[in-house]
Image: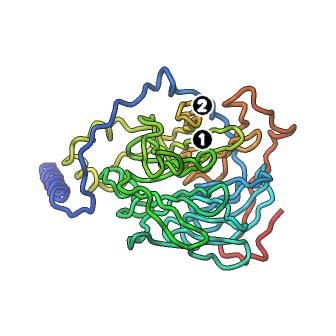
Amino acid sequence: MKRFFVILLLLLVLAALYLLIAPTKVAPVAWSPKPAPSSTEGTFALNDKLKGMQRIAQIGVVGPEGIAVDAVGRIYAGYLDGRVARFAPDGSGYTFFGNTHGRPLGTAFGPDGGVVVADAFKGLMFLDGGNEPQVLVDSADGVKFGFTDDLAVEKLGKGIYFSDASSKFGFGHHMEDLIEHGANGRLIRYDFRTKETKVLMKDLHFANGVAIGPDDEFVLVNETSEYRVMRYWLKGDKAGTSDVFIDNLPCFPDNLSYNTMSRRFWIACAAPRDPMLDKMAGDVFARTIVAKLPAFLQPGPKRHSIAIGVDVNGQVVANLQYAGTDAYSPVTSVREFGPWLYFGSLTEKAIGRIPLRVAFPDAPPPPPGWEKVPGPYDAGPADQKLEGGERD
């Protein structure tokens, strides 16, 4: 027994030495977050509005992270295996649209058809459903994109705004960026006509979701680790300047979207704020140690669905949540279309859907029979031929 405790003590000493002297890319920056909003009362009080979310488009593939909906209600999503797919509004009618051979995240529609994809590894890409994927751009100002994340196309289709979440920590290393709290993110514009890129904002704290406001007046970009959404003005007296659109969110904001009909923005929240991370915000040493811990010992997200609706002035108009073992989580994108709210996730195996009436009781009702959802089916391999990818 004595020998056992000696060995245990030795292992603990070695582990402590490792945590003290092991090298790490993470260089924590001290900061002071505002106290998190109450989860028991007020604007962001916990509720069960996202309980029982429908899971549609179950094709046996993980991670429809950034979804988009076209003018006739078809849903587009990119998956962990690189494929980009299209579905009918009820999740049926799977169509293989191409494969970026990377990790597609945000999706949007190009000015001349096709789908523009923010691929975490490869940059800004274009798929037309028939030819090989094309890389539009993979760097700006001489700095290669480290984590291309979300995107939004201008109303007239001349340019596209997108985020490079972290030029230092790539996809799969977002926790390291959050622990560091370094300003490694950028908001960038790509011009479809001139093929030029322009960095609009830099030194952002994990630049994530992107959405363009009414009449292309401004563009929003999330700073995930600051719990806020920034606004960059494109028109008017403030053009070229930025300010805070909404601050001190109760969560880690992910993708953004805007619905022109309702004039609402939707903020997808990957997880609620972690009290321990907030407490360690000013403790550089403790966060350096946490960064060296194995991933399974680091703080992890709770299974908690959160989506926040915001008007064009940054005022909260909807607070949708559900914390439970069966929650659709993490919510990484939200799209409003017709009588629906659609949800994407980095790790779920389905696209989520709820009637818009859950958030707004006076919204149009979903069509009769909407409760019946097509069952799971096999979508086939990720490298299937484009001309043979359509399934009913």
Task: Indicate the position of residue 128 as horizontal and vertical percent values.
Answer: 71, 72
Q: Which one is nearer the viewer's eye here, 294 or 282?
A: 282
Q: Amino acid at mark 1?
A: Phe
Q: Which one is nearer the viewer's eye here, 280 or 145?
A: 145
Task: Indicate the position of residue 14 as horizontal and vertical percent values.
Answer: 16, 58
Q: Residue at x 14, y 57 (%)?
A: 17
Decide if residue 309 is in sight here.
no
Q: Residue at x 38, y 43 (%)?
A: 226
Decide if residue 336 is in sight here.
yes
Q: Using the image, tell me which numbered label, if any, was put on residue 138.
A: none
Q: Single out the residue that lies furthest toward the right.
A: 368
Residue 337 to residue 206: above or below: above
Q: Are marks 1 and 2 in contact (CB under 8 Å)?
A: no
Q: Mark 1 highlights which residue? A: 265
Task: Indicate the position of residue 30 as horizontal and vertical percent values.
Answer: 23, 45
Q: Residue at x 63, y 72 (%)?
A: 99
Q: Residue at x 73, y 36 (%)?
A: 355
The quarter of the displayed image where residue 126 is located? bottom right
Task: Indicate the position of residue 167 as horizontal and vertical percent values.
Answer: 38, 64
Report the label total: 2
Tell me if 368 is positioned left or right of 266 in this view: right
Residue 211 to residue 355: above or below: below
The quarter of the displayed image where residue 275 is located? top left
Q: Amino acid at mark 2?
A: Ala
Residues under labels 1 and 2: Cα distance? 10 Å
Chain-order first, disc 1 or disc 2: 1
Q: Which one is nearer the viewer's eye here, 84 or 212?
A: 212
Q: Mark 2 highlights which residue? A: 318
Label 2 SS: strand
Residue 289 to residue 246: above or below: below
User: Label 2 neighbourhood size at 10 Å, few (<14), some (14-19), many (20+)?
Assistant: some
Quarter of the figure that contains the C terminus: bottom right
